[in-house]
Image: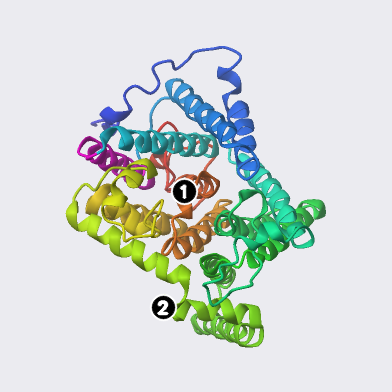
Amino acid sequence: MTQAIPPAEPATPWLLRWQGLLAGAEGPLASRLSLVAGLVLCALMAGLPLVTRGGLSLLITASGLLWVLWALCTPPGRIGPISGWLLVMLGVMILATGFSPVPIAAAKGLAKLVSYLGVYALMRQLLAVAPPWWDRIVAALLAGELATSVIAIRQLYGDASALARWADPNSVADGTVRVYGPLENPNLLAGYLIPILPLAVVALLRWRSWPQRLYAAAALVLGAVALLLSYSRGGWLGMVAALGVVGLLLLLRAIRHWPALWRRLVPLLVLLVSVAVLVVAVTQIEALQVRVMSLFVGREDSSNNFRINVWLAALQMVQERPWLGIGPGNTAFNLIYPLYQQPKFNALSAYSVPLELLVEGGIPALLAGLGLLAASLRKGLAQLRGESSWALPALAAVAAIAGLCVQGATDTIFFRPEVQLTGWFCLASLAVSRTADAGPGRSSDSGASGAEAPGAP
């Protein structure tokens, strides 16, 4: 009787063969890597709106170095779809930097991208090995959000002269007072809050004790109020998208065992009621009406006119360099954009995330971004029917990404670290999500979990 031949172990990708070189190393830090990583990430996420750029840079650098050390001590796993698309994006940006007309400036943008990827890699590694850290990182994120929201709301009762600089006299919404909290920009405040709100919703449902739930509820309510008071049109649309998507996904998951007819009718009825409520709010509340109607007046609104002129100039840049762009980062953009800009329309970015990807890395960068988005949505939506403790975090991540995509259509606030790092946290949550619980750190190759294995970037 012949013995069954065990399947051969999959070969380690050459890109990961450096990982695990120090496997088996002992020491006080090696045994506490997850704790140190968790504390650093909690400090980073809590301090996003409050810490200086220098402080954020130190925490981001520390996160990347911790991941490198952890990867050296951990055998490599496979590269999952989300990490795979991120590596494709990195490869495109490396090529774009090499062929950039301003390679030194583009290299600065590339270094910034690599540092953010280090934070993502550490988050993914920590969540794969120690899933309880998801709740702790969210709690830290909500702490920073609460402080930011309180500061923003209190600005209504302080000196209004500082807020007046955000009231554009050439806009149809002239006279609107816009809060900005500690972030010095109402649009940045809105972008920072958008991905946090669905995380607060899920924390409210996921956490068990009443103090925890009150904490999450306070963060949700105050964050929504502060976002409304920012009077950021893109922020409002992003909030509607984020909260609408998380509500719809939670509803679909809650009724997944209902009869097929009700599974179709109930979401449709909820959507119709929600749209009706929004229409009534816009038509009856004057402040909302003025800001929403400014979206449809074209160039008559100064903000619209500014963005249209920047978009036209950015499209000319894409036409000149469609395949590899000008290289990553705002430093490269600031050097090249003046050659195409219309008079008096200075800009720091393309004011559209898809257009920014085209400008920086050409068509390959946009395709990589779309591939990353598709892979992320696929991982998240798989949780609608799965039975896993990762289901709610994954749905919150999908909703956060939806909100960021809606706002990112007409703004590039996403590329600021206060916003982007929350997006990396959502991607890391999706990268390790499982459709069925399999112990912490278990590789998806050993079951049906679908999570990316520890050790992969």
Q: Which residues are magenta?
A: 80-101
| Image position of 220 with respect to 35: above or below | below
The residue indicated by pointer 1 is 427
Crowd around label 2: few <14 · some 14–19 · many ≥20 (10 Å): few
Depth check, front residue: 421 or 54:
54
Depth check, front residue: 365 or 23:
365
Q: How is the image coloured?
A: rainbow
Quadrant of image for the C terminus: top left
Quadrant of image for the N terminus: top left
Labelled disc at residue 440: none
- Residue 318 lies in magenta, yes or no? no
Give the residue furthest to the front: 343
- List x then y, in percent, for residue 417: 51, 44
Specify the amino acid type for callout 1. Leu
CA gap, disc 1 to disc 2?
A: 35 Å
What secondary structure prevails in the magenta region? Answer: helix
Give the residue furthest to the right: 211
Specify the amino acid type for callout 2. Gly
Q: Quadrant of residue 102?
A: top left
Residue depicted at x 33% and y 63%: 311
The residue indicated by pointer 2 is 298
